[in-house]
Amino acid sequence: MKRRRLQLTKGHRLTLYAFSLILLLSGAAWAWMHRLDEAGGTNDAWRNLKPWLLRIHGLGAPFFVLLVGTLLPGHVRRSWHASKNRANGAFFLTTIALLTLSGYALYYLGDEEWRRFTSQFHLWLGLGAPLLLLAHVLIGRRATRARDS
């Protein structure tokens, strides 16, 4: 079957999904362990995993942003000009930008109040981002099926 102009190749799509999953799991696991640690509910073995989860998350983030960047000249530009899935796509890209900026801020912020706020913002936005990606994919597929019918 002929691939649609606006669809990603299977390899590109699977790589994007894999890095999305790595970021979601490493970030959510770190947040969960951090909460347990603050409540005194972890032992040293669990506590030693936290830095590794952050390292995995920190390594996966630039690769994910790079992958999203590869979508801009093709997928995003063609979809925007075709007026396809614009609102959800723009919202998703804005979410990625905010996650990138808040992740950067978490690394460099010194003020604990701002850091606490930024951490919560980053966590909740990061937990919601996969839902935005899923919505974007499903809306795009529905539009493709409707057009092909």
Image (spheres, rainbow, N blue to C red):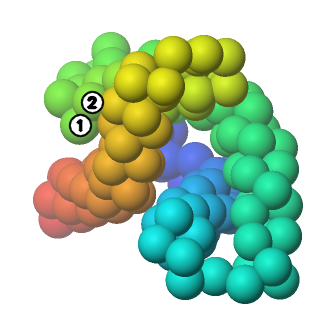
Q: Is residue 61 above or below residue 49?
A: above
Q: Toward which corner of the image does residue 51 lie, by quadrant?
A: bottom right
Residue 41 screen position, x and y as percent? 55, 83
Q: Nearer the viewer, residue 58 or 36?
A: 36
Side of 76 relative to 8 (left or right)? left
- Point out the image quarter for the N terminus: bottom right
Q: Residue at x 76, y 42 (%)?
A: 58
User: Dot 2: what SS?
Assistant: helix
Q: Residue at x 33, y 49 (%)?
A: 124
Q: Which residue is mark 1?
A: 88
Q: Toward which corner of the image does residue 113 lie, by quadrant?
A: top left
Q: Which residue is mark 2?
A: 91
> Callout 2, which amino acid?
Phe
Residue 119 screen position, x and y as percent? 45, 38
Q: Toward which corner of the image does residue 105 lie, by quadrant?
A: top right
**Can residue 124 be seen from the camera position used here?**
yes
Q: Residue at x 83, y 83 (%)?
A: 45
User: Dot 1: what SS?
Assistant: helix
Q: Are marks 2 and 1 in contact (CB under 8 Å)?
A: yes
Q: Is residue 132 above or below residue 90?
A: below
For the residues labelled 2 and 1, the Cα–Cα distance comes to 5 Å
Side of 76 relative to 18 (left or right)? left
- Label 1 neighbour load within 10 Å: few <14, some 14-19, many 20+: some
Numbered disc total: 2
